[in-house]
Amino acid sequence: MKDCNALVKDNRLVAQDTCLMTLACELSPFTPGQFLMLRLTGTCDPFLRRPLAVLSYREGIVEILYKVIGRGTSLLAGKKKGEELSVLGPLGKGFSDPRPEEEAVYVAGGTGLPPILALAERMGRGSLIIGARTKDDIPLWERMQNIGGVEVTATTEDGSLGIRGMATQALNDLLKTVHKPCVIYACGPTGMLKTAASLAQVFGARCEVSIEERMACGFGVCSACAVRTTAGNQKVCTHGPVFDASCIEWGI
Ligand code: FES
């Protein structure tokens, strides 16, 4: 884990309310699913850092894909080339690699694309399902389609791109066609993760989920990010954000 200043190289809108930020900074190698805590420099507003998943990191350049949904991310979206940010990370526990015999299925919805896309790009094999309300909510569509070895399917609730419907329906349909050991990697709304976990049980697949939770410190000292698991409450920032789906107490 490193705490350093990063220089904004680029920061642009790539879908509705979604920005791709490129930063120059020296990080340790990351595992897809790990995240950075970002903070504006030279101000205490907003005071807390924002947790954002790493999309890619290579040769001192890190990519962050983020949804503009509050004051912190709005301020982040206003950052221009040449400005600085404070970066802490990579933090948390990322996804495990698929086993050699396993078919890998990646599922993303809502704001859950960055860790899933990072993993699909790293692995270069399997199937990726991206679900959204409408095509304008899907960032980096062309980039996803160009991942060698990964079959990409979009689902949209209004049918404006790909299959009309939900990502979990497409996941169900896909799992019916997989006749070998399978691992599902998912990040997105809780309902989607819960359904992915149920489908994994039905089809006898492994399932890892990346939990999106509010965080304050990002490294285990404040207890702001607890999630209920079969082993008791665990901290998303240090025990996760990636968990074995069968260990999560999903509630009703
Ligand atoms: S955010 Fe502080 S313990 Fe997880």
Image: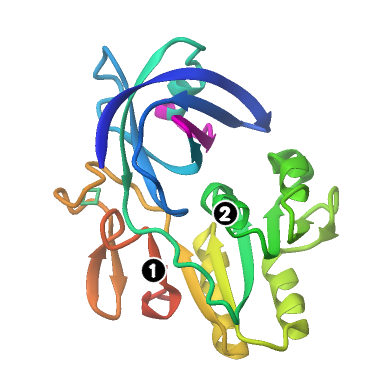
The circle drawn on residue 243 is: 1
Labels 2 and 1: the sequence-earlier one: 2
Classed neighbour count for the residue bearing mark 2: other residues with Cα under 10 Å, few (<14), some (14–19), many (≥20): some
Q: Which residue lies furthest to the left in this view?
A: 221
Mark whose residue sits in front, 2 or 1: 2
- The residue singled out by tag 2 in the image is 122
180 vs 87, left or right, is right
Quarter of the image for residue 198 reads bottom right
The front one of 195 and 148 is 148
Q: Is mark 2 on a helix, strand or loop?
A: helix
- Total marks in image: 2
Q: Looking at the figure, which quarter contains the N terminus?
A: top left
Tell me the kind of residue under disc 2. Arg
- Mark 1: secondary structure: strand
- Could you tell me the amino acid type at mark 1? Phe
* Residue 54 x/y as whole percent: 46, 43
- The stretch of residues the image draws in magenta is 59-72
Side of 250 relative to 216 (left or right): right
Tell me where residue 109 sits by quadrant: bottom right
Q: Which of 227 and 84 is in front in this view?
A: 84
Q: Is mark 1 within 8 Å of ligand 1?
A: no
| On-image quarter of the C terminus | bottom left
Question: What residue lies at 42% left-to-right and 11% top-to-bottom?
Answer: 83
Q: Does ligand 1 reach within 8 Å of label 2's beta carbon? A: no
